[in-house]
Every structure is written in C-alpha cells, then in structure tokens.
Amino acid sequence: MSKQQIKSLIESRAHEDGMVDTGIKGVQLFRITSPLRCAPAVYEPTVVAIVSGVKEAILDGKRYVYDSSQYMCCPTSMPVEAGTPAASPENPLLGVIISLDPRVMTELAIHMENAPGAVRRPKGGPLPQGLTLAPWDVSFTDALLRLLQLGDSPSDTTVLGDSRLRELYYAVLKGAAGDSARRAFGAGNEISRAIEHLSSCLDKPVTIDELAAQVGMSRAVFHRKFKQATTMSPIQFVKSMRLNNAAMKIAGGMNVSEAALDVGYVSSSQFSREFKRMYGQSPRQWSYAAQLPMGMA
C-alpha cells in the first residue's frame, strides 16, 4: 500500500515532463513520457526510485534495467549511458531522485559500523561495484513515503526535511544496497575519495601514482581495488568521465572544441578519435543523432 501511496503523491505533483522540486534539498520528482535512447551521462551519488515505467543504465558495457520492483543506488560518481527507451504517454516513467549527501552518509555509515552488535565484514572481501539494484524493502518504502508526504506542508518540510531524509539514507545503508553504500561512505572508503578527487579535476593531468599516494596505497593495490569497485581501470575511468562530460556539454549546445578543452583535451583531433572509439560516431555525428527522435537516428 505504501508504494501505491508514493505513486499517487508523484502523479499528483508531476503533471508535465521534467523534474519537480519537493522543497527538500536534493530530492526531486520526475515524469518522462518520451522515449530517450541511452546516451552518455555522469551519475553523481544518487538513489533513483521508480514507481512506473522502466529505466536503463549501462556501466562499462553492463546493462542495468530497473522498474518499480528495484531502486538504483549509485554511491560514487560514475560515467554511464542512461535512457528511458520504453517511456510513452501511455506508460510514463515516474519516480524520485535523491542525492546522497556525503557528509550525512559518512556520519551514518560510521555510526552503524560502531553500533553495538554491528556485523564486521572481512576487510579482504570483494568490493561492491558502482551501481546496485536493490529491492524495495519495508524500511525503504516507509521512509520514502514519510519523506514525500512532507511536500503537502511547507512548514513540515522546513522543520522535518533533514530528519526524514536522514531516515531514508539509513534505510538505504541497512538495505540490499548497504554494502556498496557503506564501502563508499564508511571507514576504508579510499577508492570513493579517489573518485571524488578525479571528478573534481577532469581538466587537469592526473597520474595513477599520484592517486595511489593520496590514499596511501601502492600503485598495484590501488589499480586492483579501483577496478574491483568500478569495473574499470583508473585510466579507463578518467577517459570515460571526460568523454561523457564532453558529450553532455555538446548535447547542451557547446561546440566540440570548447567541450574538448573543458574536459582536459589539448588536441581536438585526439578528442575526436577517442570519442569515436568510445561511441562509434564522431562528436559532430553524435551531436546530430542526439537531437533526433528515437528510430530516426
């Protein structure tokens, strides 16, 4: 019943295509009725919960398809391709996107690790990978409903917004996506810190040795753990982040040369070669195709 209540709340507030602010920082509703092919994007630390329709994301060739049976948790910045190829007026994509505040998530993750009776996982265990699909459990569903119900009252939103959002974060950390989220925000989150650093300086040269030294690892250990956590080597990750950011800038109207410089490419020809190798089209061909409706490209 709670999930149906959430759907009703979203339907009553998201009347047109696009994003709708809830009044709670980092929480937005969305409605999409047009099919969108998977295109380069960058996911920031986020939870996406869908109540109607289907969404897709591709990370390093692996496809993640999720609907109202699972929510998606991305605890670190990730270069992906994302789209809504099945959306239509008859079957709109409806849902909510929740940004994960690193400060609050870290505080909660550390509290959970130090709580009486906390389960300590082996330090040498496998690292959960960049995107996780988790079933809606009772805690997550109830916390999301309580969060969205605040939208009916501006005063309730102002007074209770942060605490209800904190409750939702806690539900995520306890749920099936919890391993991935706690690795990203709890103690031992060196790879997440490296990703945060990389994401903030895409326009500058960065070496693996520099990154490894910043988080106190040898080059070999850093390379291995980074690939376990993201499915990509550090060099592949940086290249994907740069090209995806550039593709988004081009789709937004920036010219190819400016987009290349903005993400750290000195040579436009090198940028075009690597872009075509990644996406199968030159930047200009891709920009043209991105403007066409699905089925015409």
Image (cartoon, helix red, strand yellow):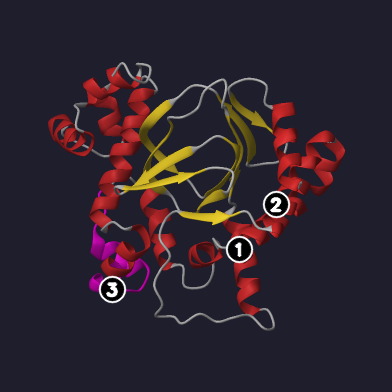
The foreground one among 265 and 70 is: 70
Q: Position of residue 65 (x, y in %)?
A: 44, 44
Above or below: residue 114 compared with residue 24: below
Q: Position of residue 234 (x, y in %)?
A: 27, 57
The secondary structure that most of the magenta stretch takes on is: helix
Q: Which mark identifies residue 18? A: none
Do the CB atoms of the residues marked 3 and 2 lie less than 8 Å apart? no
Q: Does the magenta segment cover residue 218?
A: yes
Residue at mark 1: 173
Q: Crowdedness of circle 3 by 10 Å Cα count: few (<14), some, many (20+)?
A: few
Q: Residue at x 33, y 25 (%)?
A: 250
Q: CA distance from mark 3 to mark 2?
A: 38 Å
What kind of element bears circle 1? helix
Using residue 163 as the reference point, say whether residue 48 is left or right of it: left
What kind of element bears circle 3? helix
Q: Earlier in the sequence, mark 2 or mark 1?
A: 2
Q: Which mark identifies residue 221? A: 3
Three-letter code, disc 3: Val
What kind of element bears circle 2? helix
Q: Is residue 22 visible?
A: no
Residue at mark 2: 141
Q: Earlier in the sequence, mark 3 or mark 2?
A: 2
Using residue 119 as the reference point, say whether residue 275 is left or right of it: left
Discs 1/3, front: 1
The foreground one among 270 and 39 is: 39
Of the 4 image quadrants, the one containing the C terminus is top left
